[in-house]
Amino acid sequence: MAVIVQKFGGTSVGSLERIEAVAEQIVKTKRQGHQVVAVLSAMSGETNRLTKLAKSIDGNPSPRELDMLLASGEQVSIALLSIALIKRGFSAVSLLAHQIGLTTNNRFNKARILNVDNTRMLQELQQGHIVVVAGFQGVDDEGNVTTLGRGGSDTSAVAIATALQAKECQIFTDVDGVYTTDPRIDDNAKKLSHISFDEMLEMASSGAKVLQTRSVEFAGKHKMPLRVLSSFAAGEGTSITFEKEIDKAHPVSAIASHKDEAMIRLVGVQHGATFRDELFSALADADIEIDMVVQTSSSADVNAKLNINFTVHRYDYSVALQLVQTLATRFHIDDVSGDKQLVKVSAIGNGMRSHTGVAASIFSSLHHKNIDIYLISTAEIKISVLVKEQDLHLAVRTLHKKFQLNTII
Ligand code: ADP
Ligand code: ASP
Ligand code: MG
């Protein structure tokens, strides 16, 4: 008997009707002879609602207490689903992270999973029970409740599937698979029957929130078969495959976008590494992630002053800017400025390994639509551009069409 892990996101359990529908889905899998572990998110909007509650008391709430609060959302959905399963005559048991030994480090709000103990879950499965686990949460080595960052239930599901050596980890959501781009941005987006892990990882890390980046990393590392499906309609969904196929006809497989970008510009930085070292260490100490970094020099003279531009998540912008301004005064930097209305659009494809001219096509097609590019970064299978927030939809649609993703099968 194979173990199947099925994860249901917020919209999929967003109302009592939806919870009843999810119970039906699980019963169907159980009747096919599988052992089922369901991993659930909080009901849609709940994590936002709880965050707002905390922030209305303190704009910067204690991270430990925030996790204690946020983790409660998943406790509600797992209990409701178990009640719905038991009503249908199936024995179900809901379990919190500490009850299954899902341990994490102690970085509240973005904890990383360290281990999942399969003992309790295997015992329950052997007794014929359906196991319903709270996603998104963990417990650190001092017994504190932690959470895994937004979208973290995907990662809980993959980690649990790995611990149980499940046959497949199925991520049920509100779209019927992974598309060539976010179908909410471009209605010409096409559903992919499969996509490689490399591409999925780049898509997730470039903003395609259908899977949390860490869940894809985890699945890739442990070779856990992953599938994205709809909880609203039957279908095969999209399977994330381990083959590194190079689609010759399409250098680009997908377009992803990330909304909440911000850029900080430093003009006239003295030559040498001291300032740069201090700057990026200070940002790292403040737990601020840097994405794109570009350093330029105004002349070929090795001692010429430098300009440094880099991007951070918009959420971190004001702290980052303040930190940079303090350092800039100490180091006599000519000018510091920033822009927080930016977005990142990325073209992703294994086909880039064997095609040239992708960057040129991106730049010229955006230029033809009068879209300014602020920063560019390139990697083996990804090219990203930073553009104004108001250009997001046009940029995504332009690139989607340019690389003929409208016609992909
Ligand atoms: P859940 O609540 O089930 O975890 P999410 O909202 O986190 O669901 O992820 C699903 C959403 O991801 C979709 O509604 C869709 O708008 C978005 N999305 C972004 N890029 C893609 C893509 N390439 N393919 C499918 N969905 C995408
Ligand atoms: N409930 C959490 C969130 O809204 C975790 C998840 O849905 O995956 O981010
Ligand atoms: Mg999600």
Image: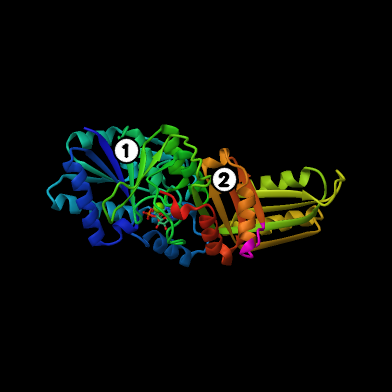
Q: Is mark 1 within 8 Å of ligand 1?
A: no
Coordinates of residue 17 in the picture (x, y in percent)? 23, 61
Quickly name the residue at label 1: 168
Residue closest to the far left = 89
Identify residue type, mark 1: Glu
Secondary element at image label 2: strand
Q: Is residue 219 left or right of residue 374?
A: left
Number of residues whose C-alpha sits closer than 10 Å to that of mark 2, classed few (under 14), some (14–19) or many (20 or more): many
Magenta span: predominant SS is loop
The front one of 243 and 402 is: 402
Residue in view at x 59 percent, y 40 percent: 380
State the extent of the magenta-drawn residues as a range. Answer: 368-374
Q: Quadrant of residue 215?
A: top left
- In the rendered view, would you say 372 is above or below 295? below
Residue 382's tag is 2
Identify residue type, mark 2: Lys
The front one of 223 and 40 is: 223
Q: Is mark 2 within 8 Å of ligand 1?
A: no
Q: Earlier in the sequence, mark 2 or mark 1?
A: 1
Secondary element at image label 1: strand
- Is residue 327 highlighted in magenta? no
Coordinates of residue 149 in the picture (x, y in percent)? 46, 50
Q: Is residue 31 left or right of residue 254?
A: left
Query: In the rendered image, is residue 99 in sight?
Result: yes
Instruction: Locate ligand 2 by image quadrant.
Output: bottom left
- In the rendered view, would you say 45 is above or below 358? below
Residue 41's tag is none
Residue in view at x 28 percent, y 32 percent: 119
